[in-house]
Amino acid sequence: MLPVINLDDENFIDIFEEARQMISGVYPRWTDYNEHDPGITFLELFAWMKEMQQFHMNQVGKENDLMYLKLLGMKLLHRKPAKTIVKASGVDRSRVLPKGSKLMAGSVSFETEGTKNLEEAQIKACISRSKSREVILEGNALRRSGSHWLFLFGEDPQAGDEFLLQLDRALLPGMEHSIYFKIFEDYPIRRNPVTGDMVPLARISLWYYSQEGWEQCEVVGDETHGFIQSGRLCLSFGKSMGRLDDGYLIKFKLEDSYYEVPPTLEEISLNMLPVVQKDTFVEYQDFIVHRSGTIKAGKRSAEETDIEELSEDLELILDNYLSLHGLVELYILEDQGYYPCTGYELVREEARTRLRMENPFLHREEDVLNLKVVSFRGDAVLTRCYEGDGFPYQTIDLDNPDIFYESFELLVENELAPGYYLPWQKVESFSCSEEADNHYVFDDRKGMVYFGNAQKGRVPEGNILIIGYATTLGVRGNVKAQQINRLLGEEGIRISNPDNVSHGRDKETVEACFKRYIRGFRQVKRAITREDYEEIIKSTPGLMVEAAKVIPATAPNCVTIVVSPYGGERRLVLNRAYQENILRLLDKKRLVGTKVRLLSPEYIGVSVYGELAVKPHYLHAREMVQAAVEDYFKKIGQEFGKTVLYNEIYGIIDILDCVARVENLSVNAQGKGITRSMNQDLVLPPNGIVYLKDAHFSVSVKE
């Protein structure tokens, strides 16, 4: 390990005294060392200067810290907006809310994360049909938070079980509809966060009853991942819904089931809106237009999707709130950069804006055009335009420390082609920038924009346009439950957030980033030791693993692990989905050439029978003995291969105050791989887990 060098190891007195002691050897004729002597005054001055120099040389500045973090592969986390789900009620007619619709919690602004349909339809009933029974729960009863729970597919989900929603009105075809499911998740063993590559624990098909019979739904997105966690399920219908059994039905059919706990519904709603705490002033949307007539829309690296067919005139669909209530600018990408276009018309509808312009290919040879549509609030007209002077080290003070880092984007005028604008790239620092790189640094903590010095980063000359600008409060946006209560422009709709808003975060400090690196460094990333395998398995995404233990292997280069899924009162073995998820994770982390073998627990049921003499006046002696034995088996039942000691069971009974003596005690077990020692102990196999199957005690009162 490199030694820590301290360059500031002397104070002013030490430096001055050392210099004064050198006087006689350097200049013997200097004999007056008192403070009034001018030479002593100079020595004091130089000693002070040396102390200051040593102090500053010994400091590690923020720039140094940031470079060290970069060498470690780390960078500071920026401010993160809070997120939550809000519930809308009192919807008198179906309508569409555009992306970025404003909600308020006092003076704190929230926005919808995407375009959302508010449904007039209400849930009449939830119906659970399993092989054993059918349960019908009225919609009003289910909406009383916490008063009713419903097992979606029964208490023991099996293939063929169904869950049905009965609506009082039909949902429109050809539109995306979302249903929010609040699933019970408060188990003693928490489910690990779900990742995208998880093997699902269930395969569910979605159906709706149309005017022609049952039709399959198109699943647009499933945040619940098969009802293992709360979230929205988005779907759409190809045909109009038909009426059946006094309502309109949506059916969820269980095709395959590998659930460890049955999905339990706590609450369901058609009008739950995901919102994020931010206030957008300026935003943009990119479009790619092909001569063939296809228009594709995307933002930054978003996946492009077909949205419209090009006719004689070009029409772009803008689905954001600012395009409806703010100002809009259109830019076309040319060879020299983006050029502002003025020949277009805006048609504002209830939930979207149509931007129409003459077919741009009539006077062009290109087959593909890139368009950028910028929407901004009216009060942001002056604050989004600045001017570069061509000198190094330019800065822009935005005078706002709450700007959302990810939202901030710039266009800078091309000095070689005035009137055309080039996109500039936001970077963390200029350390890797070259002379001609269009780079800038945005410090969201100060609300400052920094440009380069013509050696590290290009210098802007001309107009600077802000095309992305939103604010967020970070931690201050984590408001309490029921505080979000207003939807701007929709005064008749009641809004509330059932839970406290969370996940808002301020910008990370350098010290916190170093601590995060240390925590991450200590995390297990490779499966080498026994403890590594056990910890990695317990963290398998989407699973609830109660216990995992590496046991002696039966073959070379093979690791054998027994894994116990959490099942509540049920004793579960490893199913196919659990094995695939665990092996898929271990395959990324195991050593090359190491084979992995998974074993299910072998559950060993133990029966205890005893004849006891108890003391008088203990009316509940049998119950006291029963409770003591049950506690013992609960403790040892958490370990694989734990030997059941006959003497321990005898001892915990014998020491009870109510017991005079133990006259007879027998301990028996059923299961594979059990052996009995000479001391009557039960020796379990390495993958064995013991549980108390039954216990019976015959008591007699000692006279």
Image (spheres, rainbow, N blue to C red):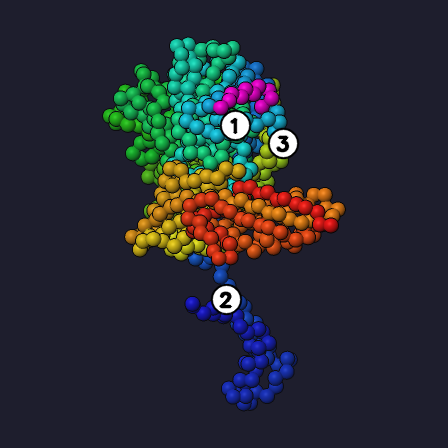
Q: Which numbered tag is attached to residue 151?
A: 1
In the drawing, does residue 138 fall left or right of residue 525?
right
In the drawing, does residue 702 fall left or right of residue 130?
right
Instruction: Report the residue at 59% width, 53% height from top.
Output: 650
Whether 380 is drawn above or below 116: the answer is: below
Mark 3 or 2: the one toward you: 3
Earlier sequence position, callout 3 versus callout 2: 2
Instruction: Tell me which amino acid carries mark 3.
Output: Gln
Whether 128 is drawn above or below 445: the answer is: above
Instruction: Report the residue at 43% width, 14% height from top.
Output: 209
Mark 2 or 1: the one toward you: 1
> Mark 1 falls on what kind of element?
strand
Which residue ends up furthest to the bottom in the rendered image?
Answer: 28
Would you name the residue on which mark 2 appears?
58
Marks 2 and 1, how far apart at CA: 65 Å
Instruction: Report the residue at 55% width, 17% height from top.
Output: 124
Instruction: Tell me which amino acid carries mark 1.
Output: Phe
Earlier sequence position, callout 2 versus callout 1: 2
Instruction: Tell me which amino acid carries mark 2.
Output: Asn
Would you name the residue on which mark 3 appears?
483
> Mark 3 falls on what kind of element?
loop
Q: Which residues are magenta?
A: 132-142
Which residue ends up furthest to the left in the rendered image?
Answer: 365
Marks 1 and 3, how far apart at CA: 31 Å
How crowded is the residue under tag 3: few (<14 C-alpha within 10 Å), some, or many (20+)? Answer: some
Q: Look at the image and tell me whether residue 63 can be seen.
A: no
Whether 170 is drawn above or below 682: the answer is: above
